[in-house]
């Protein structure tokens, strides 16, 4: 759960940064947010969570 919240904050901050630097338009940001929202309610959510957990586990710790 802590990893999921941290990743949500990370991707939210990244999305905000892309909007601020105008690398991403408001329409594209809306599509990205809605895609994530609807992806979370599908059967793919477990696979995405497992993939992100595996990536976090594979990263070396300092």
Image (cartoon, helix red, strand yellow):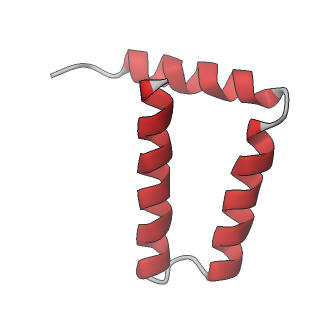
Residue at x 49%, y 51% (from the top left corner): 11
Q: Is residue 3 left or right of residue 34?
A: left
Is residue 32 depicted above or below 47 in this figure? below
Q: Is residue 13 left or right of residue 32?
A: left
- Give coordinates of residue 44: x percent, y percent: 79, 29
Residue at x 77%, y 42% (from the top left corner): 39
- Give coordinates of residue 17: x percent, y percent: 41, 69
Furthest-left residue in view?
62
Is residue 16 depicted above or below 59 in this figure? below
Of 15 and 62, nearer the camera is: 15
Furthest-right residue in view?
42
The tally of labels here is: 0
Residue 52 falls in image quadrant: top right
Is residue 55 depicted above or below 16 in this figure? above
- Give coordinates of residue 50: x percent, y percent: 61, 18
Residue at x 62%, y 25% (from the top left corner): 49
Residue at x 74%, y 66% (from the top left corner): 31
Quadrant (top left/top right/bottom left/bottom right) for the C terminus? top left
Of 45 and 56, nearer the camera is: 45
Q: Is residue 21 left or right of residue 60?
A: right
Q: Is residue 38 left or right of residue 8?
A: right
């Amino acid at each position: 759960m802590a990893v999921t919240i941290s990743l949500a904050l990370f991707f939210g901050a990244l999305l905000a940064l892309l909007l601020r630097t105008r690398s991403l338009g408001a329409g594209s940001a809306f599509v990205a947010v809605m895609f994530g929202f609807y992806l979370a309610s599908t059967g793919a959510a477990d696979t995405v969570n497992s993939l992100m957990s595996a990536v976090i586990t594979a990263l070396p710790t300092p």
